[in-house]
Image (spheres, rainbow, N blue to C red):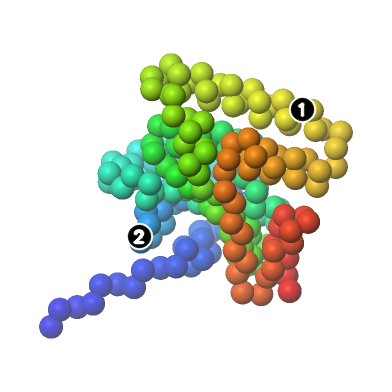
Amino acid sequence: MLSKPPLRKKPTEIIKSIPEFDKKESLFLKQRGGEMDSVHKERHERYTIPDVEKFLKFQREHGSMQGKVYSVHTHIDYEPIPGYGDIHGFFQTIINNNYTSMVVSQIDSRYKAEAGRCHVAITKETKQLLSGLNTQEQKNAFLNKLRTKLSEIDNNSKNDSDEMRLHFFYNYCKDTLKLRFKFKALPGYRFNKNGLYFEKI
Protein backbone atom coordinates (compact mmCIF):
# COMPACT_ATOMS: atom_id res chain seq x y z
CA MET A 1 0.00 0.00 0.00
CA LEU A 2 1.33 3.40 -0.97
CA SER A 3 1.96 5.69 2.00
CA LYS A 4 0.23 9.04 2.05
CA PRO A 5 2.41 12.10 1.53
CA PRO A 6 3.02 14.10 4.73
CA LEU A 7 0.48 16.80 5.44
CA ARG A 8 1.65 20.24 4.37
CA LYS A 9 2.17 22.61 7.30
CA LYS A 10 0.06 25.76 7.34
CA PRO A 11 1.83 29.14 7.22
CA THR A 12 0.80 29.93 10.82
CA GLU A 13 2.38 26.67 12.03
CA ILE A 14 5.64 27.45 10.26
CA ILE A 15 5.76 31.02 11.56
CA LYS A 16 5.11 29.88 15.14
CA SER A 17 7.77 27.16 14.86
CA ILE A 18 10.50 29.81 14.55
CA PRO A 19 12.18 30.53 17.92
CA GLU A 20 11.03 33.84 19.43
CA PHE A 21 8.59 34.37 16.55
CA ASP A 22 6.72 36.84 18.79
CA LYS A 23 9.83 38.90 19.58
CA LYS A 24 11.86 39.02 16.34
CA GLU A 25 10.79 39.35 12.71
CA SER A 26 11.08 36.38 10.36
CA LEU A 27 11.47 36.15 6.59
CA PHE A 28 10.25 33.38 4.29
CA LEU A 29 9.87 32.51 0.64
CA LYS A 30 6.88 30.49 -0.54
CA GLN A 31 5.87 28.76 -3.74
CA ARG A 32 2.13 28.72 -4.35
CA GLY A 33 0.87 25.34 -3.24
CA GLY A 34 4.08 24.59 -1.34
CA GLU A 35 5.41 25.15 2.16
CA MET A 36 7.25 28.27 3.25
CA ASP A 37 11.03 28.17 3.68
CA SER A 38 12.75 30.47 6.15
CA VAL A 39 15.43 32.56 4.46
CA HIS A 40 16.57 34.92 7.22
CA LYS A 41 20.18 35.08 8.35
CA GLU A 42 19.65 37.57 11.18
CA ARG A 43 16.42 38.43 12.97
CA HIS A 44 15.72 41.60 14.91
CA GLU A 45 12.71 43.27 16.50
CA ARG A 46 11.97 45.49 13.48
CA TYR A 47 13.86 43.98 10.56
CA THR A 48 15.55 40.89 9.16
CA ILE A 49 18.71 40.30 7.14
CA PRO A 50 18.18 37.68 4.43
CA ASP A 51 20.43 34.68 3.96
CA VAL A 52 21.62 35.17 0.39
CA GLU A 53 22.61 31.53 -0.06
CA LYS A 54 19.19 30.26 1.06
CA PHE A 55 17.51 32.86 -1.14
CA LEU A 56 19.50 31.83 -4.22
CA LYS A 57 18.93 28.12 -3.48
CA PHE A 58 15.18 28.70 -3.39
CA GLN A 59 15.44 30.68 -6.62
CA ARG A 60 17.29 27.84 -8.33
CA GLU A 61 14.71 25.30 -7.20
CA HIS A 62 11.62 27.37 -7.98
CA GLY A 63 12.87 30.02 -10.39
CA SER A 64 10.79 28.61 -13.21
CA MET A 65 7.60 29.23 -11.20
CA GLN A 66 7.17 32.70 -12.67
CA GLY A 67 4.62 34.68 -10.70
CA LYS A 68 4.12 31.82 -8.24
CA VAL A 69 6.87 32.58 -5.72
CA TYR A 70 6.47 35.30 -3.12
CA SER A 71 8.00 36.54 0.11
CA VAL A 72 6.41 36.51 3.56
CA HIS A 73 7.73 38.44 6.54
CA THR A 74 6.41 39.31 9.97
CA HIS A 75 5.82 42.55 11.86
CA ILE A 76 5.76 42.28 15.66
CA ASP A 77 2.98 44.38 17.25
CA TYR A 78 2.74 47.00 14.53
CA GLU A 79 0.87 47.63 11.30
CA PRO A 80 1.24 45.02 8.53
CA ILE A 81 1.81 47.70 5.89
CA PRO A 82 5.20 47.13 4.18
CA GLY A 83 7.83 49.68 5.14
CA TYR A 84 9.97 51.81 2.84
CA GLY A 85 12.70 49.17 2.66
CA ASP A 86 10.13 46.44 2.13
CA ILE A 87 8.65 48.21 -0.89
CA HIS A 88 12.04 48.90 -2.43
CA GLY A 89 13.04 45.26 -1.91
CA PHE A 90 9.72 44.13 -3.37
CA PHE A 91 10.36 46.08 -6.57
CA GLN A 92 13.83 44.59 -6.78
CA THR A 93 12.29 41.10 -6.79
CA ILE A 94 9.58 42.18 -9.25
CA ILE A 95 12.15 43.49 -11.71
CA ASN A 96 14.91 40.91 -11.24
CA ASN A 97 13.06 37.75 -10.15
CA ASN A 98 9.56 38.10 -11.66
CA TYR A 99 7.82 38.15 -8.27
CA THR A 100 4.27 39.49 -8.34
CA SER A 101 3.24 39.56 -4.67
CA MET A 102 4.38 39.68 -1.07
CA VAL A 103 2.75 39.08 2.31
CA VAL A 104 3.24 40.82 5.66
CA SER A 105 2.02 38.93 8.72
CA GLN A 106 1.17 40.92 11.86
CA ILE A 107 2.15 39.08 15.06
CA ASP A 108 0.40 39.78 18.38
CA SER A 109 3.10 39.16 20.99
CA ARG A 110 0.69 39.44 23.93
CA TYR A 111 -1.27 36.39 22.79
CA LYS A 112 1.59 34.78 20.82
CA ALA A 113 -0.65 34.64 17.76
CA GLU A 114 -0.77 35.62 14.11
CA ALA A 115 -3.37 38.39 13.96
CA GLY A 116 -3.72 38.80 10.20
CA ARG A 117 -2.01 39.19 6.86
CA CYS A 118 -1.58 41.99 4.36
CA HIS A 119 -1.32 40.68 0.80
CA VAL A 120 0.37 43.08 -1.64
CA ALA A 121 0.28 42.40 -5.38
CA ILE A 122 1.25 44.17 -8.57
CA THR A 123 -1.45 45.15 -11.06
CA LYS A 124 -1.56 45.74 -14.81
CA GLU A 125 -0.84 49.39 -14.05
CA THR A 126 2.27 48.43 -12.07
CA LYS A 127 3.49 46.37 -15.01
CA GLN A 128 2.96 49.39 -17.27
CA LEU A 129 5.20 51.48 -14.99
CA LEU A 130 7.95 48.89 -15.47
CA SER A 131 7.34 48.05 -19.12
CA GLY A 132 10.17 50.19 -20.50
CA LEU A 133 12.88 48.68 -18.30
CA ASN A 134 14.73 46.52 -20.81
CA THR A 135 18.35 46.83 -19.72
CA GLN A 136 19.98 46.38 -16.33
CA GLU A 137 21.03 50.02 -16.45
CA GLN A 138 17.39 51.09 -16.84
CA LYS A 139 16.31 48.76 -14.03
CA ASN A 140 18.99 50.11 -11.68
CA ALA A 141 18.04 53.70 -12.54
CA PHE A 142 14.39 53.00 -11.70
CA LEU A 143 15.31 51.36 -8.37
CA ASN A 144 17.63 54.25 -7.45
CA LYS A 145 14.91 56.78 -8.29
CA LEU A 146 12.41 54.80 -6.21
CA ARG A 147 14.81 54.69 -3.24
CA THR A 148 15.27 58.47 -3.46
CA LYS A 149 11.51 59.05 -3.62
CA LEU A 150 10.85 56.79 -0.63
CA SER A 151 13.52 58.63 1.35
CA GLU A 152 11.90 61.97 0.44
CA ILE A 153 8.51 60.74 1.62
CA ASP A 154 10.06 59.57 4.88
CA ASN A 155 11.92 62.84 5.49
CA ASN A 156 9.03 65.12 4.48
CA SER A 157 6.59 63.42 6.83
CA LYS A 158 8.72 63.32 9.99
CA ASN A 159 6.63 66.05 11.64
CA ASP A 160 3.35 64.27 10.93
CA SER A 161 1.66 61.83 13.28
CA ASP A 162 2.47 58.15 12.86
CA GLU A 163 -1.06 57.52 11.55
CA MET A 164 -0.80 60.32 8.96
CA ARG A 165 2.61 59.06 7.79
CA LEU A 166 1.28 55.51 7.47
CA HIS A 167 -1.77 56.56 5.44
CA PHE A 168 0.26 58.83 3.17
CA PHE A 169 2.72 56.02 2.39
CA TYR A 170 -0.11 53.51 1.97
CA ASN A 171 -1.86 55.82 -0.51
CA TYR A 172 1.42 56.43 -2.40
CA CYS A 173 1.84 52.68 -2.84
CA LYS A 174 -1.73 52.35 -4.12
CA ASP A 175 -2.07 55.51 -6.20
CA THR A 176 1.44 55.98 -7.62
CA LEU A 177 2.98 52.51 -7.60
CA LYS A 178 -0.42 50.96 -8.40
CA LEU A 179 -0.07 48.14 -5.89
CA ARG A 180 -3.14 46.22 -4.70
CA PHE A 181 -3.63 45.56 -0.98
CA LYS A 182 -5.83 42.90 0.60
CA PHE A 183 -6.19 42.45 4.36
CA LYS A 184 -7.16 39.12 5.89
CA ALA A 185 -7.88 38.93 9.62
CA LEU A 186 -7.32 35.58 11.29
CA PRO A 187 -9.76 34.06 13.84
CA GLY A 188 -10.17 36.25 16.91
CA TYR A 189 -9.09 39.46 15.13
CA ARG A 190 -10.54 42.16 12.88
CA PHE A 191 -9.00 44.76 10.60
CA ASN A 192 -9.07 48.37 11.78
CA LYS A 193 -9.38 50.44 8.57
CA ASN A 194 -8.51 53.74 10.25
CA GLY A 195 -5.36 52.48 11.95
CA LEU A 196 -4.50 49.96 9.19
CA TYR A 197 -3.81 47.17 11.69
CA PHE A 198 -5.41 44.01 13.06
CA GLU A 199 -6.93 44.20 16.53
CA LYS A 200 -8.19 41.62 19.01
CA ILE A 201 -11.96 41.13 19.03
Closer to the camera in the image, 37 or 127: 127
Percent from the top left, x then y, of residue 48?
A: 56, 43
Residue found at x 48% / y 33%: 128
Name the mark on residue 141: none
Closer to the camera in the image, 21 or 32: 32
Q: Mark 1 sits on what residue? A: 155
- In the displayed image of the protein, which residue is found farthest to the left? 1
Residue 92 visible: no
Circle 1: element type: helix
Query: Dot 1: few (<14), some (14–19), or many (≥20) neighbours within 10 Å?
Result: few
Circle 2: residue type: Gly
Circle 2: element type: loop
Percent from the top left, x then y, of residue 51?
A: 44, 40
Q: Residues under labels 1 and 2: Cα distance?
A: 40 Å
Closer to the camera in the image, 38 or 197: 197
Percent from the top left, x then y, of residue 93?
A: 45, 36
Within the image, what quadrant is residue 47 found in? top right
Give the left or right position of residue 192, taking residue 100 as reference: right
Query: Which comes before the other along the chain, label 1 or label 2?
Result: 2
Q: Mark 2 sits on what residue? A: 34
- In the displayed image of the protein, which residue is found farthest to the bottom? 1
Circle 1: residue type: Asn
Query: Against 188, is 107 above or below?
Result: above
Residues at marks 1 and 2 touching, judged by CB atoms closer than 8 Å: no
Residue found at x 73% / y 30%: 153
Residue found at x 13% / y 83%: 1
Percent from the top left, x then y, of residue 116?
A: 61, 63
Within the image, what quadrant is residue 131 found in? top left
